[in-house]
Amino acid sequence: MPLVTTQVSLASPIDPQTDGGALLDAGLYGPHVDEFRATVRDRIDRLVLPHLDSAEAAGRFPAEVIRELGATGLFAERWHGGGDTGRSVVLANELGRAGAGGLAVGISLHLETVLSMLVRFGGNDYLRQLRDQAMRGELVGCIGASEATGGSDLERVGTIAQRTAAGWHIEGRKKFVSLGSVADFCLVLCRVHRDNGKQVARLGVAAVPRDGLHVEHSHAKVGTHSLDTVRVAVSADIPEEAMLGRPGLGLAVINYGLTMERLGAAAQLIGTCELALGLAVAHADRRSQFGARLRKHQVIEYRLADLAARIEILRAAALATAAGYGRPGGPGAHQVAGLKVTAAQTAEQVVSECMHIFGGAGYLPEETPMGRLWRDVRLGRIGAGTDEMMWSIRAVGLTPDNDSYDRLVHIST
């Protein structure tokens, strides 16, 4: 079954090669940001949150969320002009502030991970048409990278891509495939074989259609219940044009997508922290203990102030990273990895402390959302790369200041 079912003009308004102004070019704050944030918030309220409770109960991501958001032009706006990380961060932040949980993660996987790879590495008509359909929400995409034997070690990929007369045959298994039950296609990281069948170290990323994917098992997760995550068997014949970039660039392709996912994940986690803190402050204002409102107890108010300071610093860092990403001398993949792991560890601490402010009620899911938020943010330390992977990426960018060392350090021998 072909992935592409309609012809799309490459000069259409959603073509990401058309230049457009980046949101944060006019500043990190101001009416221009507030207006976009209000638009995003309205669409989340209307098109995302009404599905949350039913998706949590069913344990399945509703594909209509992506289809409806895509139809509004929101995805195309994020990728206008080749991509706007400022819009990405504001959108992800609002999804976190809305408490959208697994729905937020699923939207980000499609919008950031899948579309980033198609925008940057989809260099032929076949992939551009696939990109445009995904941009409009007509097709839902997912990522097949991790395998049971490798986890974060993507170089141990066992899924193979072998040449055929018509293109490629893809064969293997993928674990932790979120959106895998509802996706129309999957971008699969695979090991490319030579024409003679011998395995080589080169990796590639192939667009595999729905009929080449078989869900073997649905994982029961601790949190993000509204996002189904599955183990998938892959067996598909695809055309030559379905390989992103050229064979051998697989790690570069997947790492670019993961960098965009990590930036969005950091912003989502910060948004969830903002939601949790707002709820905790409201509770501390309303709840009375020992003859006074909770907030009047200095230990509580100072704890809340400490949490607020951490969140504000992270929020400013996310906006600055988005504004400077890709610019000469600006932040890159190393800094995004550092931001993501810092946001993930901070979110786990912040949401836990905010849950604690609620006392026993915070532990009751029928009375507060704190337990769900607490479970959901834990994914941040694993998804799109574990803490340890993020620190290893950040460590690559460490630069010694030898001039200052020679000038200031005088260690005797």
Image (cartoon, rainbow, N blue to C red):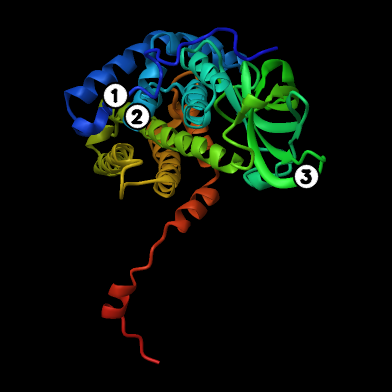
Q: Left or right: where does residue 290 sit relative to residue 338? A: left
Q: Left or right: where does residue 5 sit relative to residue 313? A: right
Which numbered circle lies on residue 199? 3
Callout in the foreground (2, 1): 1
Which numbered circle lies on residue 28? none
Which numbered circle lies on residue 20? 1
Q: How many marks?
A: 3
Who comes first in sequence, dot 2 or dot 1? 1
The residue under label 3 is which amino acid type?
A: Gln
Residue drawn at x 50%, y 22% is 365
- Local packing at callout 1 (Cα closer than 10 Å; few below 14, some 14-19, many 20+) is some
**Image position of 288 with respect to 319: above or below:** above
Quadrant where the C terminus sits is bottom left
The residue under label 1 is which amino acid type?
A: Gly
Residue named by callout 2: 84
The residues tagged by marks 2 and 3 sit, at their Cα atoms, a distance apart of 38 Å
Report helix, strand or loop for mark 2.
Answer: loop
Residue drawn at x 71%, y 40% is 191
Residue 253 visible in rendering: yes
Image quadrant in which you'd find residue 219: top right
Q: Position of residue 256 (x, y in %)?
A: 49, 38
Image quadrant in which you'd find residue 44: top left
Find out whether the residues at labels 2 and 1 contact each other: C-beta distance under 8 Å.
yes
Residue drawn at x 38%, y 28% is 82
Quadrant where the N terminus sits is top right
- Local packing at callout 2 (Cα closer than 10 Å; few below 14, some 14-19, many 20+) is many
Q: Position of residue 186 (x, y in %)?
A: 63, 24
